[in-house]
C-alpha cells in the first residue's frame, strides 16, 4: 500500500477535510450576516461608549473649570459626595419618588384604558388614536402645554373650567388652583403621567389581546363574574406586561429632565438627579462631581434595563412556546 493510499484510508481522515470546509463556510456566512451591521456597531460605540468612558475617567478627578490649577485625582471622593451631600441626596430621593409615582399612576390608569379599549364599541379606533396622542408630543412641548395652557393660575384651562363650574353651582369667588406654586412636584407628576399613560396602555392592550379567549369564555359559561375573571385570569396573564411597562417607564422617567426644567426649573424641591447634574455642571462648574452623579444615573438605569430585558426575553419565550 502506497503512502498516499494509506493517508486516504486512515480512519477519520476522509471526514476531517469536509468538516473543516463546512466550519469555514459557516464562519464566512456568519461574517457575511454580521458585516453590514459593523458600521452601525462602530458608530454606536464611538457615539455612546467612548463618551461614557471619558465621563467615567472624569468622575475620578477633582476638576472645577473655575480653578484649573487644582485639577487632580480624587479617587472615590466624588461618589461619596454624591451620596452624602444634602442637595444631591435630596435629588436622588426626588428622582425615586418621581419615578415610582409616575410609573404606578401610569400603570393603573393605562390598565383601565386598556380594558376599555379591549371592548368593542363605536368609535374605538378614534378613541385609541386620541388616547395615544399625548405620547407622541415632544416632551418639552408637553411640559409647556401643562405650564401655560393648563396649570397657569391666571388663564389656564383648569382654573377656567373651575371658575365656570363655580359660577353655575357656587357663590362668591371660585377657588383658584396653583399647582406650580403650591404643589410643584405634583404638577410635574401629573404632566408626566399624562404623557406616559398611553405608553403603558399600549403595552397592556397588547397583553389583553394575547389572552387565551377560550379560557375566558369557559369561565363565563361556568358563571364567573367579570371581577373574578379579571382577578384570576386577566391579571395573572398581564403580570409580565405590567412588569415590562413599569421597567421601561422607569428607565425613561428616571432620566427625565424636560418636565422639571420647563415646569419648575428645579425649584421648590423638584430637582431630580438629572437636573442636579445640570446645575452642578453648568452653574457650579464641578465637572468631576457632575460626572460621578451621571455615572450613578447610568448604573441605576442599567440595573433597571437588565430586569426589563429579562422580562422581554421571557415574553418572547412564552410566545415561542405557543
Image (cartoon, helix red, strand yellow):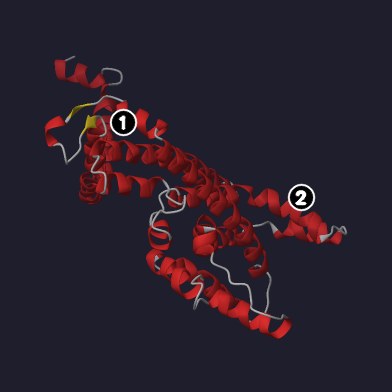
Q: Residues within 10 Å of mark 2 (few under 14, many from 20)?
A: few
Above-or-below relation of 158 to 3? below
The residue that disc 2 covers is 232
The residue that disc 1 covers is 78
Residue 57 at x, y percent in the picture: 23, 32
Residue pictured at 19% horizontal, 14% vertical: 1
| Camera-nearest residue between 120 and 96 | 96
Find residue 265 and report its image quarter: bottom left
Which circle's residue, 1 or 2, is located before the other in the chain?
1
The mark lying in front, picked from 1 and 2, is 1
Q: Residues within 10 Å of mark 1 (few under 14, many from 20)?
A: many
Residue pictured at 49% horizontal, 59% vertical: 188
Residue 207 image label: none
- Whether residue 302 is visible here, answered yes or no, is no
Above-or-below relation of 251 to 14? below
Above-or-below relation of 160 to 304? below
Amino acid at each position: 500500500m502506497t503512502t498516499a493510499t494509506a493517508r486516504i484510508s486512515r480512519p477519520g481522515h476522509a471526514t476531517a477535510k469536509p468538516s473543516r470546509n463546512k466550519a469555514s463556510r459557516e464562519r464566512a456566512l456568519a461574517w457575511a450576516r454580521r458585516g453590514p451591521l459593523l458600521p452601525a456597531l462602530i458608530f454606536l460605540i464611538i457615539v455612546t461608549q467612548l463618551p461614557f468612558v471619558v465621563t467615567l475617567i472624569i468622575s475620578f478627578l477633582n476638576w472645577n473649570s473655575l480653578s484649573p490649577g487644582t485639577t487632580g485625582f480624587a479617587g472615590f471622593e466624588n461618589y461619596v459626595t454624591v451620596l452624602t451631600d444634602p442637595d444631591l441626596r435630596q435629588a436622588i430621593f426626588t428622582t425615586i419618588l418621581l419615578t415610582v409615582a409616575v410609573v404606578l399612576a401610569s400603570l393603573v390608569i393605562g390598565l383601565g384604558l386598556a380594558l376599555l379599549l379591549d371592548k368593542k364599541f363605536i368609535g374605538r379606533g378614534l378613541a385609541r388614536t386620541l388616547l395615544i396622542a399625548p405620547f407622541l408630543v415632544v416632551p418639552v412641548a408637553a411640559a409647556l402645554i401643562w405650564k401655560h395652557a393648563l396649570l397657569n393660575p391666571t388663564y389656564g384651562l383648569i382654573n377656567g373650567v373651575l371658575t365656570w363650574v363655580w359660577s353655575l353651582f357656587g357663590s362668591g369667588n371660585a377657588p383658584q388652583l396653583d399647582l406650580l406654586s403650591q404643589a410643584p412636584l405634583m404638577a410635574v407628576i401629573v404632566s408626566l403621567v399624562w404623557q406616559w399613560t398611553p405608553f403603558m396602555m399600549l403595552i397592556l392592550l397588547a397583553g389583553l389581546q394575547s389572552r387565551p379567549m377560550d379560557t375566558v369564555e369557559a369561565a363565563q359559561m361556568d358563571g364567573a363574574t367579570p371581577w373574578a375573571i379579571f382577578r384570576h385570569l386577566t391579571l395573572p396573564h398581564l403580570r409580565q406586561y405590567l412588569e415590562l411597562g413599569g421597567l421601561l417607564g422607569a428607565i425613561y422617567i428616571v432620566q427625565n429632565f424636560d418636565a422639571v426644567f420647563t415646569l419648575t426649573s428645579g425649584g421648590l424641591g423638584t430637582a431630580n438627579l438629572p437636573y442636579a447634574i445640570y446645575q452642578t455642571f453648568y452653574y457650579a462648574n464641578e465637572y468631576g462631581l457632575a460626572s460621578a452623579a451621571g455615572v450613578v444615573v447610568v448604573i441605576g438605569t442599567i440595573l433597571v434595563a437588565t430586569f426589563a430585558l429579562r422580562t422581554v426575553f421571557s415574553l418572547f419565550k412564552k410566545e415561542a412556546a405557543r
